[in-house]
């Protein structure tokens, strides 16, 4: 059992994603995106709407553009707060700045939209953890959906 497996010996959610059915991986990706938005307090209506509805309705190009612009704005503000490129910062450094964790939550929503469901779930998980989501909550979502 590795440290990532936790106390129960259950497989790491990231490994379970790789073995999951595409539909389950997609539902998990959007659940994790919603979790990241909730934990970080995202208030942008487009990000929240997409995270909530998943793929129940096609995402409009204007909505995608809004998400990308929002992420870019948040990333720039995060870089200004950090005084460095956020991609070279640790999760602990990012989590000291609300704008940085909000950027990661929006990135989780964008990740959930990726065409490949397994990649969507994997990237949404990475972004949600960087946003400060608790490992236990991520694992609970995996236990329920994967």
Image: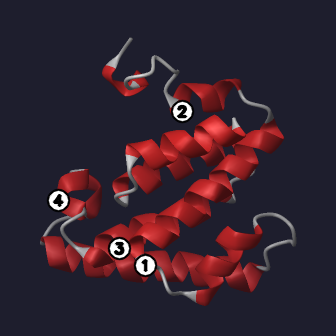
Which of pointers 3 and 2 indicates the residue nearer the eye? 2
Q: Residues within 10 Å of mark 1 (few under 14, many from 20)?
A: few
N-terminal label among 3 and 4: 3
Is residue 52 visible from the viewing direction of this image?
yes
SS at badge 2 = helix
Which of pointers 4 and 2 indicates the residue nearer the eye? 2
Q: Residue at x 31, y 22 (%)?
A: 3
Report the number of numbered marks.
Answer: 4
Residue 63 x/y as whole percent? 70, 82
Q: Are marks 1 and 3 in contact (CB under 8 Å)?
A: no
Q: Which residue is tagged 3?
A: 75
Q: On the rendered structure, is 29 left or right of 101?
A: right
N-terminal label among 1 and 3: 1
Is residue 65 visible from the viewing direction of this image?
no
Q: On the rendered structure, is 11 left or right of 57?
A: left
Q: Which residue is tagged 4?
A: 93
Q: Which residue is tagged 1?
A: 41
Residue 22 x/y as whole percent? 79, 38
SS at badge 4 = helix
Mark seen at residue 13 = 2
Question: Farthest right residue?
Answer: 57
Q: Residues within 10 Å of mark 2 (few under 14, many from 20)?
A: many
Residue 59 sits in quarter: bottom right
Q: Residue at x 48, y 63 (%)?
A: 36
Which of pointers 1 and 3 indicates the residue nearer the eye? 1
């Amino acid at each position: 059992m590795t440290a990532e497996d936790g106390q129960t010996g259950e497989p790491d959610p990231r490994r379970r994603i790789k073995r999951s059915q595409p539909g389950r991986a997609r539902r998990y990706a959007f659940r994790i995106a919603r979790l990241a938005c909730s934990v970080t307090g995202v208030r942008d209506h487009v990000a929240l709407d997409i995270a909530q509805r998943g793929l129940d309705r096609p995402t409009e190009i204007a909505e995608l553009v809004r998400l990308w612009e929002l992420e870019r704005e948040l990333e720039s503000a995060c870089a200004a707060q950090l005084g460095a490129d956020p991609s070279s910062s640790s999760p602990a450094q990012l989590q000291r700045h609300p704008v940085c964790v909000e950027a990661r939550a929006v990135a989780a929503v964008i990740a959930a939209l990726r065409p490949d469901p397994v990649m969507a779930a994997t990237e949404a998980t990475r972004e949600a953890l960087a946003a400060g989501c608790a490992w236990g909550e991520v694992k609970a979502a995996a236990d329920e959906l994967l």
